[in-house]
Amino acid sequence: MALVVYNLKVEMLREVFVNILEIQDISKIYGTVNALRNITLSVQQGEWAAIMGPSGSGKTTMMNIIGCMDKPTSGSVILDGDDISRLSSEELTGIRRDKIGLVFQQFHLVPYLTALENVMVAQYYHSIIDKEEALQSLERVGLQDRAEHLPRQLSGGEQQRVCIARALINHPKLILADEPTGNLDEANEGIVMDLFRQLHCGGSTIVMVTHDPGVAAHAERTVVLEHGRLARITSNPAKDF
Ligand code: ADP
Ligand code: MG
């Protein structure tokens, strides 16, 4: 009995403390530019981390590497147990499709497709077409009554929520968002941040680039890059997540 309880506890701790992402001493060199220099960073499952830093400090380069769109020049990146720095482009595409949900500053919605169809394009990419599930995904972001609207008939905040619905379609292990509120007014920023908070409460792991300290304050930790180096990591005051 004691052994069963012990094993259960170990299992629960593993669930709580497992690192979904382990970046080990990565550097990225473009010609003569050192975009990233010897970065080491772990992200726990269920964590919300913000990445900040001046323009050109390497934020997008790091997101591209974590998101399996690029590879580091040296060092390793373990994502959910796979060393993605050693994979081929085809393998990276597969990992990205299965494990990553991407949200961009520029929404990248197809302009002549409805909100529902834009979400279903993501399903197509994952080789599933399930209108009911796409509608449920829109419902999760509070847009079930906007399913038949085109992007231009939606506010910026609503468009970003469609993007989040699209990113959630594969139940990603990791949600990566690069300046997701960068194009939104304050009211819409609040709605989108509420949505990320709900996702976080539901157990999602989120890595979010932002210029805005108010946005970063929603995360548990803020990672600051400067000139491609990890300048510091700050823990944000506890939230009632
Ligand atoms: P941030 O997102 O923090 O603004 P980036 O990661 O986009 O910074 O860029 C970091 C540095 O790497 C910059 O000096 C940028 O010019 C350079 N860089 C980024 N991507 C490329 C590329 N594809 N080719 C050459 N240089 C690049
Ligand atoms: Mg950038």
Image (cartoon, rainbow, N blue to C red):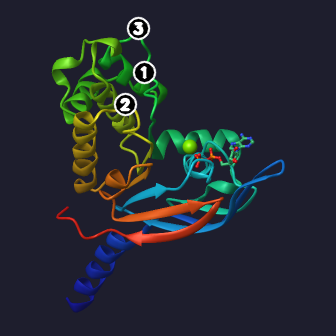
Q: Is residue 162 above or below residue 59?
A: above
- In depth, the one of 174 and 88 nearer the eye is 174
Assess whether mark 2 and mark 3 are in contact (beta carbons under 8 angstroms): no
Q: Which residue is mark 3?
A: 112
Element under disc 2: helix
Residue type (three-letter) at the residue carrying disc 2: Cys
Residues packed near mark 1 inside 10 Å, few (<14), some (14 to 19) or many (20 plus) = many
| Residue depicted at 57% across the width and 68% down the height | 231
| Residue depicted at 28% across the width and 18% down the height | 154
Q: Which quadrant: the N terminus?
A: bottom left
Q: Earlier in the sequence, mark 1 or mark 2?
A: 1
Q: Earlier in the sequence, mark 3 or mark 2?
A: 3
Q: Is residue 197 left or right of residue 208?
A: left
The image quarter containing residue 235 is bottom left
Asked whether mark 2 lies closer than 8 Å to ligand 2, one says no
Q: Which residue is mark 2?
A: 163
Residue 109 image label: 1
